[in-house]
Amino acid sequence: MKKTGILIGAVLALLLAGCSSKSANNSSSSKSSSSGYQITGSSNSDQYQNVISNGRYLTSKARGVGISQNSDNLLNLKSFENGLTQLSKTKYSPKDYVFREGQLLSSATVEKWLDRQSKSNSLGLNPEDNGQTDPNKRNPIYVQQLEEQDYMKQENGKLVLSGITIGIGMNRKDYYQKEQYGATFTTNIPQDKMIAEGRQAAVKVLQRLRSSGKVGNNVPIMIAMFQQAGNDSLVGGSFYSYTYVKSGSTINSWQNLDTKSYVLPTTANSSLPNDNDETSFESFKKQVQNFFPNLAGVTAQAEYNGKQLQGMHINITTQFYSETEITAFTQYLATAARNYLPSGIPIDITVKGSDGDIQSFLAKTAKQSTYYTHVFGSY
């Protein structure tokens, strides 16, 4: 049986820094409301305000709990968490809701759910180990990760639980060893089997939440299904469907999603849904490399919904050593990005040295035409 482990993502300091807050009532809390808390301000109307408890950011009781696969693709975790929040915005507007990391499911509970069923664990969402080691005969681990997000509303000085999102990460490839420290083998899971197992898991999770006594019957619950990328993938996985249950414990329908991540430059065996986006990136890359030849690489991750580009993360590795070079390069990047990269989408550009240290950062939102820039100096 695979060991369960905990991957704890770091909470960005930007969530707390420079944010104004306002106090809530100090009366006693209940299972569906929180008092004695503060909320951060938000510098962007598209971002959630967050909950602070006793002067500290309120972290999830079970954040990042997952099944260890030896060489996990950490890009999956990033894509999973970021994508889950973006999906939640379609049902819980940041203008009306406050974000709280999951407080209903403990680490012990989630670990049991992610484990296999056994005589000692009837709550496992993964099938019992049948003792087989052949890739096509063994029962694989289907459910890889699970995360809870809580969405609150301010009512009469309290934060009231008004919506929940559950993300469930599913494997298409299950990595395992026949003996400890031995070679790693892979069980490939068909798409339809992954979807079927995921929907069964979603029903169980929904029913368990409703019967826990912590969630009112009329609190909406969104459950979003995520397909894990393989360990050798250069991008994280993507969400493929979700359901939104306004009340009760029955899932009546699923909404399919057509989201996917791509790596740029593309290879002979891959292409972007929109050729114009690839042309824009290649023009940007060529322009930058011609102007500054001391570059080790220019790559990007592009996020698509169908054929529509949703955003782009660009990574540039340099061989610069002086701060003046980095500053000049960053200034040039801001101009080249504005001239060559697609408009109307969020884009961020991270410049790193050959040692991995971040040298500068550029970013813009979908509505902005100019880039915010910052050069990391030494003091």
Image (spheres, rainbow, N blue to C red):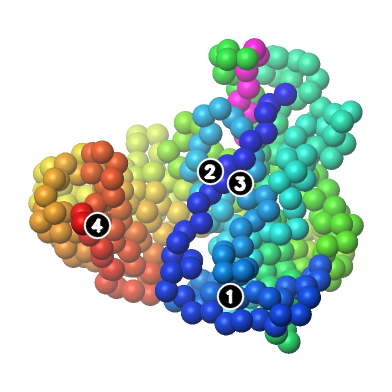
Q: Nearer the viewer, residue 42 or 367?
A: 42
**Label 4: few (<14), some or many (≥20) within 10 Å?**
few
Hey, what amino acid is under mark 3?
Gly
Is residue 375 something that shows in the picture?
yes
Quarter-of-image position of residue 339: bottom left
Tell me where residue 256 appears, x and y as whole percent: 65, 55
* Residue under label 4: 376
**Residue bearing the label numbered 3:** 64
Q: Is residue 173 visible?
A: no
What numbered label is drawn on residue 76? 2
Residues at discs 1 and 3 in contact (Cβ within 8 Å)? no
> Which residue appears at 57% of the width and 82% of the height?
22
| Residue 312 point in image, percent of width and height | 38, 56
Q: Which residues are magenta?
A: 171-179
Residue 174 sits above or below residue 209 on the image: above
- Quick check: 35 left or right of 46? right
Residue at image point 78% right, 64% down: 245
CA gap, disc 1 and disc 3? 23 Å
Q: Which label belongs to residue 218?
A: none
Q: How far apart, in angstroms, are the residues tagged by discs 2 and 3?
A: 11 Å
